[in-house]
Image (cartoon, grey):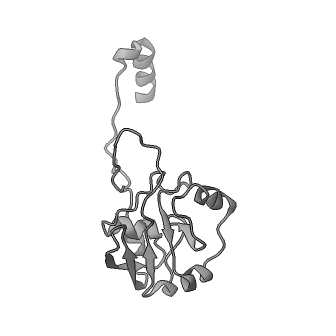
Amino acid sequence: MLRVLGQRLLSRASPSHAPRFFHASAAALHGDMSKFANNPTVHIKFKLRDDSIKEVEAKTGMSILDVAHANDIDLEGACESSMACSTCHVILEDPVFDELEEACEDEEDMLDMAFGLTDTSRLGCQVFVTEDFEGTTVMLPKATRNFYVDGHVPKPH
């Protein structure tokens, strides 16, 4: 009955005066890390762009991008982990890099656009923490390439 009434209202309303229907359901939280709460914890160091080191705790299963955002580390992730940019480019230590599965072709295509590409470069959104990461250092490149031209500095999501 309500659906029919709503359709009648919408069919009579002009586009600028169409009624709006709101829902009271809870929104899904973007970046909710509670699903990792029971996973083992490892300690990771981030070498920041100013060469300082920040040691953080990370749960296995989290992406490096998630770990960075959860710890206020300036790793952008402009495409929100959809592999459409290279702003979450990180440089890994050899032992950890060697244990990872190879990057897929889409990731390699995005890495081709990354600033400061190295042999151990990966996208932080595609690298997931394992117990092998214990004590490793993840290095941030000195810069990223983004398409902002107006001076806008995005914040992590």
Q: Position of residue 142 (x, y in %)?
A: 42, 63
Name the residue located 43 percent from the left edge and 85 percent from the top edge.
Answer: 40
Could you tell me which quadrant the C terminus lies in?
Answer: bottom left
Q: Position of residue 149 (x, y in %)?
A: 41, 40
Residue depicted at x 41% and y 22%:
5
Relative placement, left or right, of 26 versus 127 is left
In the depicted structure, whether residue 77 falls above or below residue 16 = below
Quick check: 85 above or below 51? above
Residue 132 vertical position relative to residue 108 in the rendered view, above or below: below
Q: Position of residue 126 (x, y in %)?
A: 55, 66
In this rendered view, identify the residue nearer to me: 55 or 12.
Answer: 55
Tell me the quarter of the image containing the N terminus.
top left
Count the marks: how many? Answer: 0
Residue at 42% across, 12% down: 12
Note whether residue 113 is visible.
yes
- Residue 61: x and y in percent read 49, 75
Residue situated furthest right in the rendering: 105
Q: Is residue 8 left or right of residue 93?
A: left
Q: Is 84 on the left or on the right of 25, as rendered?
A: right
Q: Is residue 37 visible?
A: no
Q: Residue at 46% x, 54% y: name it.
A: 80
Q: In which quarter of the view is residue 14 placed?
A: top left
